[in-house]
Image (tube, grey):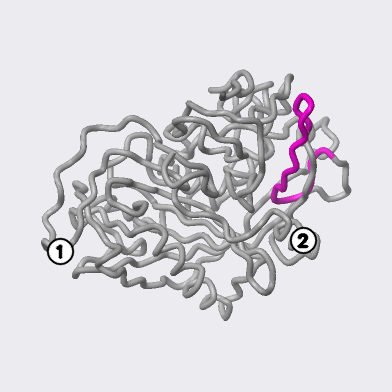
Amino acid sequence: MIGGASALGIGVLVALPAAMPAAASPAHIKHIRTGHALYDAGVHPRITAAQARASALAGTTVPEYTATQKVGTRSFRYTIVGKNPAIKVANPSTTVNAEIIPLVMKFAGHTWDPTKVDSCDPGASALARTQNSPIVKAKAHTYGGTALGTTQVVDAFQRAEFWKFAKPTGINPNFHVKLAFKTLAPVTIPVPLADAATGTTPCGNGLLGAAEINWLDNHLQTVVIPSLASKGVGTTNFPIFLLHNFVEYVNVTANCCVLGYHNTFNRTAGAQTYGLAMYDNSTDFSGSADISALTHEVGEWQNDPNTVNPTPSWGNIGQVSGCQANLEVGDPLSGTTFNDALGGFTYHPQEMAFFSWFYHQSPSLGVNGWFSDHGTFRTFAAPCP
């Protein structure tokens, strides 16, 4: 693992093609090699589990519920966005206000702008593709012949994950966790040269940009997020920062490349959750395309919004080399995507693991008795020593 047991799931994504040569760039700019893709590495929550629960109880963060799951003789207390699907309620549907904030990254005369069309995709900008994707727009979803309804792709995952309760004959057939999106004006971030790097990509301006993740995350928490208060962004919202072919590295450029993460920190008003993901059409990373990183991060935010949900130890699978013990639903299947066509464009959301996979439930609560949304996992996680 890189960066320790951080918020958001950690580790090497998949074995990838040989590193590409360094890009042509001024000699004082550090270079990265596109050889490994990471999610969620290197940043840590600035909030305790107790603070997160207090914020949830006070209603000063996104709607969340807390429950306990027993595995053998151990009990695991977790917090998930939405309403508890295992408890029958009159209205089990939750809608969270979410903002897409394009980040325009600049250094050394180079610019990476999600709002601009470039040769990586002459048909639309990264922002437009995201706005028209199944992350944002509802469409019919069917997994393994089972119709999950017309909804956003991560809500379809959430319904599939708790299908025992969300199916038409379940106790909460109208269970949902939906996002009400709006797009805010782009935010320009000048990256200090000490925290900047470049690699190569075969399209766009020929450069994959990068910033050191701890510098960027601190900048988001202390500068960018507070500046968005006048735009209505607060602790009960879920801001998502969108990058285009721009990644992060962890401390040193050899620890590259992070394609997305989600995190939380304590503000005066309560716990602030947020996410960041790259819209990827760089072709530099195997198992990554368009919205796969965004799917990973939104799914993990929904299931582990405060990044502190414990599970039995699992690992040596997906992006995880070694063991992890958290409810990061994207990590076990990083690099595994499926086709999801919408508006004449084929997107590639990431497959994700179910609650039952982490907590050793048999039979699974999930759709078709599966342990992941497209059936890659057919049994629960193996223990990790």
User: How many badges with numbers are in the image?
Assistant: 2
Which residue is disc 1 drawn over?
28
Residue 221: % across, % down? 51, 68
**Is 292 contained in the magenta span?**
no
Q: Residues within 10 Å of mark 2 (few under 14, many from 20)?
A: some
Residue 34: % across, % down: 26, 43
Quick one: label 1 or label 2, which is nearer the N terminus? 1
Residue in view at x 63 percent, y 47 percent? 304
Q: Can you tell which quarter of the image residue 379 is in? A: top right
Please name the residue shown 88% across and 42% down the image. Answer: 88
Residue that appears at 56% across and 27% down: 374
Image quarter of the C terminus: top right
Q: Is residue 93 left or right of residue 355?
A: right
In front here: 131 or 268? 268
| Residue placed furthest toward the bottom | 230
Quadrant housing the N terminus: top left
Badge 2 marks a residue whose secondary structure is helix
Query: What residue is disc 2 on?
Result: 54
Pick the residue in front: 123 or 235. 235
Residue 330 position within the rendered picture, expressed as x and y whole percent measured from the top left: 53, 38
**Type of residue at label 2?**
Ala
Q: Residues within 10 Å of mark 1 (few under 14, many from 20)?
A: few
**Start-end of magenta stretch:** 70-86
Looking at the image, is 328 positioned above or below residue 57?
above
Which element type, helix, strand or loop, lies under badge 1? loop
Question: In which quarter of the view is residue 364 placed?
Answer: top right
Asked if 220 appears above or below 96 in the picture, the reply is below
